[in-house]
Amino acid sequence: MNSRSARLSEIFKEKIPCLDGAMGTMIQRRKLTAEDFGGPALEGCNENLVLTRPDVIADIHDAYFAAGADIVETNTFGATSIVLAE
């Protein structure tokens, strides 16, 4: 078992873990521009921010941890072939 899996097992033994929340809402609060997303064609594609503004995504994840989250998920809610094909 790797260290991440071991830590997750420990968290589950200690308590019901708290996960992150509304990533889309947190991103919208940032009032990002089309350029932040990678240009007008990608505006609103939150998943692309991992590439274009990793600082924003990391800051949001840090905020979740600061608020008490035990686990944060990747910024991939709409990262499906259908959504990304648009």
Image (tube, rainbow, N blue to C red):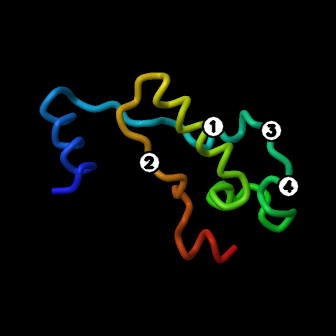
Whole-number angstrom distance, CA of label 1 to CA of label 4: 17 Å
Residue 25: image tag: 1
Residue 45: image tag: none
Q: What residue lies at 54% left-to-right and 33% top-to-bottom?
A: 62
Residue at disc 1, secondary structure? helix
Amino acid carrying mark 3 in the image: Lys
Above or below for 3 versus 86: above
Q: Earlier in the sequence, mark 2 or mark 3?
A: 3
Residue 10 horizontal/vertical position (percent) = 17, 36
Closer to us: 64 or 2: 2
Residue 34: image tag: 4
Whole-number angstrom distance, CA of label 4 to CA of label 2: 24 Å
Amino acid carrying mark 4 in the image: Ala
Q: Earlier in the sequence, mark 4 or mark 2?
A: 4
Residue bearing mark 3: 31
Closer to the eye: label 1 or 4: 4
Crowding near the residue tagged with mark 2, few <14, some 14–19, many ≥20 C-alpha atoms within 10 Å: few
Quadrant of the drawing holding the C terminus:
bottom right
Amino acid carrying mark 1 in the image: Thr
In the visual, does 54 lie left or right of 37?
left
Residue 73: image tag: 2
Q: What residue lies at 41% left-to-right and 23% top-to-bottom?
A: 68
